[in-house]
Amino acid sequence: MSLEVEVANASNLPNLETVGKIDPYVKITIQGLTKKTTVVKGELNPNWNEKLVFDLKGQQIREQDELVILINDWERLGRNRLVGRTSLVMRDVLKSGFGQQRLSLSLFDANQRPLGAILNISILYNPPPGSEINVQPVGREIGGNQGAGEGDATADLVDAGVTGDAGTDQLDASGGTGGGQKRAARRTKVGPGAREPLSTKPQDFQLRVKIIEARQLPGANISPVCRIICHTQTKQTTIQKSTNAPCWNEIFFFNFVISPAELFEKPVIFGIFNSRQLRSDAFIGSFKFDVGLIYDEPRHSFINKWLLLCDPEDTMAGHKGYLKICATLLGPGDDAPTFIPMKMSEAEDDVESNLLRPSGVILRPATLRLKLYHAEDIPRMDSDFIQGVKRVFGSDDRKELVDPYFVFSFAGRETKSKIIYNCEHPEWNQELRLAIRFPSMCERIKFQIFDWDRLTQHDCVGTEFLNMAKISRVGGDINDGDGFLPTFGPCFVNFYGAPREYSEFATGHEELNTGKGDGVAYRGRVLVEVQTVVGEVPLTPVEDLLIDDVLRVQKFLRRRKYKLHTAFMGASMISKVDSAVEFEVSLGNYGNKLDESLPPSACTTQPTNAVFDGSYYYFLPWAERKPCVVIDSHWEDISFRLEALNLLIGITDRLEANIANVRLAQKGNMPLPDLAQCLISLLDSLIIDCRKPLPDVLEDFHMQNELDLQLRQFRLTELRYIVEEATKLRETATNIDEALAEVENYLASLKNLTIEPQNSIPDIIVWMIADDKRVAYYRVPAHLLLWSKNPDYRGKYCGKRDTIFLKYPGNKAERENRWEVPALLRLKIWFGLAKDEHEWHKMQTEGELAVFAETYENQASILGKWKSPPSRPDWSDSTGKVALKKEDFKPPAGWRWDGEWYVSPELSMVYEKDTGHSRFMEDVYECQSRLPGTNWNASSIPWTDVKGDAATARKEIELPEGWNWEDPDWQVDLNRAVDEYGWEYTVEATLGGYGPVERNYHMCRRRRWVRMRNLLTSVKTQTDLARRDILTTEGWEYAPLFSMKFHHRERKMDLVRRRRWHRKMVPEDEKKKDAAAQPCFFSFAAKLEESTKEKKDDEDPMKAVTAAPRLFLVCKKPNQYQMRAYIFQGRDLLAGDSSGLSDPFARVVFMNQSQATEKVDKTLCPTWDQTLIFESVDIYSDPRILADYPPEIVIEVFDHDAFGAAEFLGRTRVRPMVILDPSAPKQPMLQWYEVKKGKQSGGELLMAFELFLIADGKELPFQPPRNPRNNKIFMVPNGIRPQMTRTAIEVMCWGVRNMKRFQLANVTSPSVEFEVGGQVVQSKVIRNTGRNPNFDEPVLFFDILMPKEELYAPPLNIKVRDNRQFGRKPLVGVFVVKSLELFRCSPLPMDAEEDEITSIPNASTARASRGGDHVVDIRSDDKAPLPIDLWEEDIDWWSKFYASVGELDKCRQYLELGYDKIQVYESELEKVPEFNEFSDFCHTFSLVRGKNIEDEESSQIGEFKGTFRVYQLPGDPSAPLPPRILKNLPPSGPIECVVRVYVVRAIELQPKDPSGLADPYILIKAGKSKVHNRNEYVPNSLNPVFGRMFEVKVSLPIEKDLFIRVKDYDVVGADDTVGETIIDLENRYLTKYRATVGLPQTYCESGLCLWRDSQKPTDILKNFCETHLRSSPVFVDDNTVRINGRAYTLSEYETKKPVHSNLGPANERLALHVLNNVPATMGTPLVPEHVETRKLYNPLQPGIEQGKLQMWVDIFPTTIGLPGPPVDIKSRKPKKFELRVIIWNTKDVILDETSITGERMSDIYVKGWIRGIDEKQETDVHYRSLDGEGNFNWRFVFPMDYVPAEQSLIIKKKEHFWSLDETERKIPPVVIFQVWDNDKFNPDDFLGAVEMNLESMPQPVRMSEKCSLDQLPNIQRSGGSDVKLVSLFEQKRLKGFWPVYSDAGGVRQLTGKVEMELELVTETEAAEKPVGRARDSPNQHPKLDPPQRPDTSFLWFTSPWKTCKFIVWRRFRWYFIGAVILILIILFIILFFYAIPGTAVRKMFGIK
């Protein structure tokens, strides 16, 4: 079997040499085999004519094999350079049969660019006899136009795993192809649904990966190493030598500061390599998936998962082994899981149950095909500088300034299209192909358009992602037929990014084009088609499409005319006030005003100046003429897709709202029958909704593709399933919560249906434009506005009034801290087919839609007279760029004039800068200048405004009508940085930079004159007068220049003016339904030639000959309303001041009005109790429609600052209750509304709103009462404000802790203020916190009126002040208790005992079970107990620990001895649910100071400890008060304690050293006391076992915080902190759960479980009963105790006879049993003996866990007594063992060599070592084994350190020669034996190996004939291994045969058998019976004699005589004998012929 490649010649090779020519040669590679031709010197057209023959060694050529051909330039010195390359997939060769094929191949460079060179070769493949070539046709496509369940497509889908297990999206954790029930299939995800849109804001992430082990790696004698690559980081494990089953147990940390949107798309690659010292590492296999896949898993983690390794380049090679990993992805605040090793009982099923692989049996090769047709609307990307230069020289060549090409990416691979130069609508017509392994684990396909640049980096035009889950589906059952392969299109894909307008400079929004952030503008679209072909590998990445494919998609390009109508009903909160504002609506590129390539359209509103609303904000005064825009566009008719999407969205929204209503009713304690009726109504509504049909597909208009068919079928199936399940649930539901949970599952399924990946109509974008610049935008999907005749199919916002907030593009708001709203718009948008446009007109009930022709008359003041302006046409558009004369306007076809031209002034001109103000300050600047050395004189412009523009002189400024001067005369403004005369100086006025001090070089100065005036009339009257004035005048607008802001009153500095003319148009036949749909664009055909001549060369003549009209919705008379805003209170607002408080006030914006509440000083929970009344609000709308869709109210909260602007704290939106009949008995209810500041929560506001229609003859409700403090402020009326009740609040003010410095001084004398509902109570002052931070009189009392309903209850403010000298009491910290519900309780009865003590109520009374998170309960049996001393040597505290966590293989017979276990908690002790954070006595409140700024570190400055009791008081003030609850408190003085800290071990610490490890040790700090074990650090470990006890003395509460830090030891420099945890000792001491010392399960006076508490169980029981039960326990005898009348006996708890003799007296044991059981039944479980797992954190990475620490703390108050003996938790020490191995013989070893005489033979020797120990031992060589037998009698001796209890081998060695410390590793005791063939002049040949775990090794056999591979366990056996395994540690000695094998080909092959004897001896036994290695002295136990090897066993060149005897003579002796005889015969003949002549002569002549 061979492959012959004849290399003929090459032509046109590129010359890489500077001097001379290249020296080419050809290098060919296939299946890892490489051949080279000779070098041809100095030739660009070389001729080789050489035949290269590849010996394939029995491996057949596969169709996916690739022949790689490289032509290199040979270099004598240096590296050979690549000239060109090409490749050939062998599929084409195999398809052509076995004959010789001649090929001409094109060459490419390293970047896959064609070189124009050709290589000619011939190929001849000689396959093995009888082989057949089966090549799958290339053109077969799965999931194309066939149905998913038709023909062979279904079989391929099943084979590909598309119909895999239900519930899996990308991975199959079950390991099988699965099936799954039909119901489970309905739960699968189709689309995106699983993950919410990801944030683009960078944040901290940590990826932890633990590489545990690998198995069944292919290859012989390999040294595997694992590399992990994620993003830009690479980690690598250590190298495991000579093993196919390496065990690493290494953990790696990847730290990122990156956005989730970027990180979740990054791949994680696990690669296994064979490490080779002198060569590059050989790749074995890999596994790859996205980071987001880890995050989508439960707890964001993979735990103990096996990865199926494969070779991505060899798709049919099968698996390459298994890799076991753990991985978790942590963000701030995430809890890291513990990477717990699997238990021994689970090990056998490990692989099968935890295998990660694609959903299918195997990974199949596949091709992702992208048919790329063409693109539209690509924006300009290049400068037109060169074009401008060409026009200067007379060139008329116009080019589109973009050179697009397309990039198709998936799973880290990409391919590119060709570049289309100078084209904004490129036609590629190419097919891009990517080779993938299907099903893939990567989630998104990425499409990108780039602009090619010759000199600079290519620019990204736009990026779009296509989620694979949206375009494919995993089926639920093999017969289901509902799975389909990824498919898409033909369909357009829309691209979004930065604004389209080209700029020479960076705009800061370029990253939007790369897919980071929300795209703000449409940037084109591309027609593509995606198909997936399974079983095919692409031959070439790019191919041109056939003409048939191009023609086939033409039917998908049919367009229909659409109309987009928008009516702007109002605009307020305008942020751009210094220039005119207009709004643009665009759909795709239609309506883009700033794109000069488009004809004009009615896409913008008229430019309007913003007007002040009298309070703070600005609005646009459109009044009754609401601007409208209309856009004509042409798109594909995909209404069948969008209508189906709208139907599903409507169903989902209704279901979501119904679920919320039921939840609200449930929360409001609605009676169960009514609640059940609500649920039944919900289900009925759901069933009706799901039975609604999907929209029909009209063949005349709609074109469906494969994905449309598949999605429609899936949706129908899902809806039918939901109807069936909901019907069953309606009939069978018995529990409300369970039924709601099931309904929420339906909701999740419906949300997965609300997907439409093929929405080819772009989103609608609304832009605010000012100064021809885009300021802010809003983007809405078109389907939400789509019109349909069926209301169910109609977009939810179609034609309806909606309120939208515009937003700044990109991250401008966050970057510049701009929280204001750019604009708030109230508008109506309608989108639909042009034929349905009349439906839009029917909706306009507010008024009439009018169309106007518009032109501006322009004039300029020349020599005092108004004449034609020289710089713009007399008649033009608003910009002055297009000449529009009135007589040139001709009505379009279908339209006629309705009246003559008339002046239509812009209403915003009515409003001056003082509009809305009742008090206004006029100001003007007096300017002077001078020359050097001269005096100051008036400047050329003596009077200016603040910007330096010319202004009217102060004495010429007239007082407006309706105003009077407040100041008698003008005054100089001295409240600025000026001199004493008000002057400020600068060098040049145009440069600015004024200063208050005069210098000699100052040439200009100015001063400000101000004068205040007051309004005499109302604002409305002022506006009406101004409006009447402008209507009665000529309507001129004046300005100094056309580019400046216009006003309606002429001023002296005005040089230009203009006025607007309108003429109305109406349809000729207004009765026609589509009359208004006629095009209404004006054409100036008569002036075409003239206009073109007048225009500049670089302008488009289209703009001069077409113009768009203005559209208005002329409303009828408005309805007047009164809006009342009831602002009651706020809670938990953000802090705006450095003190941690705010001075909050709220601004309420409604329509064009705004008002503000009063500010409340120094609080985060203000109570405003204020009503804001908005009088005479004009709303142009039908009252009935308004009642359904009322306009939104915006409430913004600010912090008042004495200097500077108010600071924004948050915003919320509310819709008012509309009351059309003011006399109706209808009142709103106060509700809490959440305030948001960006994404940050900013508290809540309690508010209500009413909107009254002011109707004739109907009076409004009475005004609310006025505030007694301020008569101008209205209060919230009684009917709305909460009902109050008398309430008591008891406050236990226990103390303050950890107070930080304030103003550089310590807080030593604090006091606390408690404020609730305006009432304040203050505590006493602590004299000195250093001596005692507790209050002497801790109990305070409130008697206050509070709301009866908890919903309205005010929060409680805690303020801590420091009492300092001179009466200063600065505020040092605050805390807000949002709700007091947690502390509510019932009052004590009047007859309660005085000394009664009540426990503090907890938030939850539910108690968890006593079982710990890791405790494994082992059922006891009736077997006889083992002797106590049998395992005593291995029983220690660690046995107890491992028995408790379930690691039974490490605890030996601990449980059989009857010892008790401990509780091992996975969390901190205080976070265990049953202990309620030890907050029963007092709570800890974190005090804060400073502003609440997101992303900044915590502003916590201390803690307050205390608690509250809230209960009702009698309503009668004279009634006696109930007894106080908080009394008989423990003493608050300091208490001395001994604290013992037991640190067991750390888990998964963050590495701190460059090696990726750490040298951890423990530092304990309490107050000023510190203890550590730095001298005993654990080197090079991330999972160190400490086993240390630390003891410190503390004084509570002064030293309440116990800091446990894990430090990293460093030789040079300070030690790094890995992480720390803090324990509040005071809470543990004061809690009723008795957390001082954990209670064990048994009382022992000796032995392992020795009692260590200061108190005996009887004393503890007595204290508990006296505290909680008011009585003492009575012991009847030692076995019986009576408590509260009930008797408890010892026999109840000890049902079996004790198995050990360490137990104490019976009465103490009984007391302990009672303590462990009775308190738990009372809801007060006592803390058991435990180990807690505490998370470690580091301030450098806040919120991200740095590892875990398992430990516990014992607290011993010195007042009780001395502490008991400490627990010995020292880590286990290894024992020394010696493994003695005798290699007796080998049998049936494969014969690897052939001798010179032709015999098969091997020179056998055996090598052995223990894994982890580098020392390898070898036998001598048994030479010339002719039958595979080897005789050795050779002894190996392996000393080792072993921990029997943990079955682990301890390896200590330095990783590198420069390492300071030895690294300790625990690995399984695995011994490895290998059989080798010895070669003297070549490397030895590996024959086979066997690896055996000494704890579970296969049992040997006595006879070699029975020895086989069946003795060894196999990972692939299902259900575990059936091989009998034994332990050498138990057997001590084993002897027999074991098989050795090789798996070089991926399959185990028996290569020999080894007879060995293994003996394990202890250190003592080894000293008593010493032995030597090999056969060295002492050669005993047993004595080894030299082996009796056959005479043929020797080394031939050292024994030449033996060589002759046993090799030459034995094999060739007959040849030698024959040769001797032959020689003798020949000699005889020679002698005969030599002697016969003489003899004959003598005979003849008779001579003697």
Image (cartoon, rainbow, N blue to C red):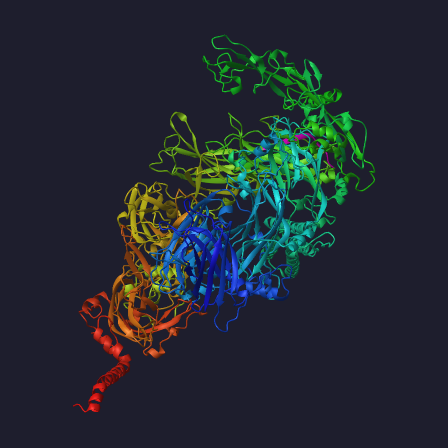
**Is 1755 contained in the magenta span?**
no
Most extreme residue toward the left is 2048
Position above or below: 851 against 709: above
Position above or below: 23 against 1322: below
Q: State whether residue 1232 appears in this view.
A: yes
Q: Residue at x 50, y 71 (%)?
A: 131
Most extreme residue toward the front is 2045
Q: Quadrant of the C terminus?
A: bottom left
Residue 1691 horizontal/vertical position (percent): 38, 66
Q: Which residues are magenta?
A: 1169-1181
Q: Quadrant of the N terminus?
A: bottom left
Position above or below: 1165 against 310: above
Which is the main secondary structure of the residues drawn in magenta? strand
* Along the line of sight, the residue nearer the viewer: 204 or 1639: 204
Q: In the visual, does 1722 lie left or right of 421?
A: left
Position above or below: 389 against 1667: above
Q: State whether residue 1518 appears in this view.
A: no
* Along the line of sight, the residue nearer the viewer: 1090 or 1596: 1090
Residue 1088 horizontal/vertical position (percent): 74, 31
